[in-house]
Amino acid sequence: MIGAMAGEDDELYAISADLTLRAAPGGCEPSELAGVSRAELATMFEQIRWFSRLSASRRLDVANAYRRRVLKLGVLADRDAG
Amino acid sequence: MQAEPELDFPRVLRELIGRGVRFVVIGGQAVILHGIPLFSFDFDLWVDPAAREEVLTWLESDDDNELTAGPRDLAPIVKVYVGHDRLDLFFVRAMTNRDGVTLTFDEVHGRALRVSDPGAGLEAVPIPSIDDLIALKHMAGSPRAKDEEAIRYLRAKKLLEPDQGED
């Protein structure tokens, strides 16, 4: 290893001389689809079908508009708290 | 009052494609481009390390962008701040996740699906296959709720479209 650095959300990654980024080991396996009910799965299918009908740029636009709304609410909340 | 600059992610994608830079959209935006209706605060690109100088020189030329490393620095992760937005660029040859699975850039780029939206000027935007994206979602040292949610949706999409549903 030639060093460690903060990555997304300030996690630590290790980087080796061959430019390979390695996750720090640990944690358990995510549950993934285990425990997802048939009804939940049907809802997920419906959501995916709906969203997949949008063009690529529209998908990015919709997600980005929602992201900006959340960011704005965060800024307003910080201002109110301050 | 001057408006806060914002990251124009589609413009970045168009520019990289236009320059012939090899890259793959990873993280939340790749999940979104797969047709999964989750939102993400993250903009992550895995970029061919050979294109590092060209990409960072271009990004540095925009006064709205603040980079954590310059074109000639060797930092393998470079963050580009545009107002409140942040684009993370990974200039690495491989990533090894917490399961010990190593994915090389060439493998992931080679298996990538290409998403196009000609109306928006987006041609053949590379996104990892569902299996590669799930493996990349295991890069966090321990499971995170947002990654687990994305993986659940990616597995559901794979059930829905076993051929991974290329656009």
Image (cartoon, grey):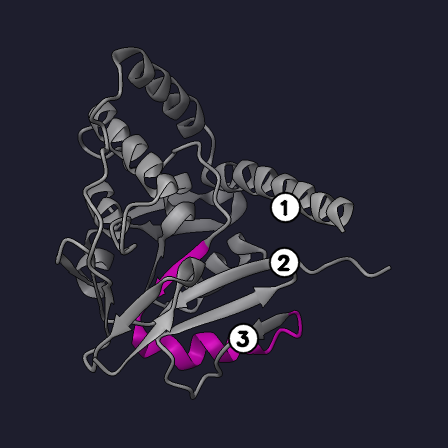
Q: Chain of mark 1?
A: A
Question: Which quadrant holds residue A3?
Answer: bottom left
- Residue A17 spot, x, y in % from top left: 20, 82
Q: Which residue is mark 3?
A: B67
Query: Contact, CB < 8 Å: mark 2 with mark 1?
Result: yes
- Residue B162 spot, x, y in % from top left: 18, 29
Query: Contact, CB < 8 Å: mark 1 with mark 3?
Result: no
B139 versus B166 height, above or below? below
Q: Residue at x 58, y 58 (%)?
A: B85
* Residues shaded magenta: B43-64
Q: Which residue is mark 1?
A: A71
Decide: few, some or many residues near mark 1? Use Cα within 10 Å; few <14, some 14-19, many ≥20. Answer: some
| Left or right position of A10 against B133 | right
| Left or right position of B136 against B74 | left
Instruction: Return the disc, 2 or 3, that comes first in the chain's sequence.
Output: 3
Q: CA distance from mark 1 to mark 3?
A: 21 Å
What's the residue type where badge 2 is placed? His
Q: Residue at x 13, y 56 (%)?
A: B101
Q: Quadrant of the C terminus of chain B?
A: top left
Q: Is residue B147 visible?
A: yes
Q: Secondary structure at mark 3?
A: strand
Q: Chain of mark 2?
A: B
Q: Which mark is residue B84?
A: 2
B132 versus B24 height, above or below? above
Q: Is residue B167 visible?
A: no
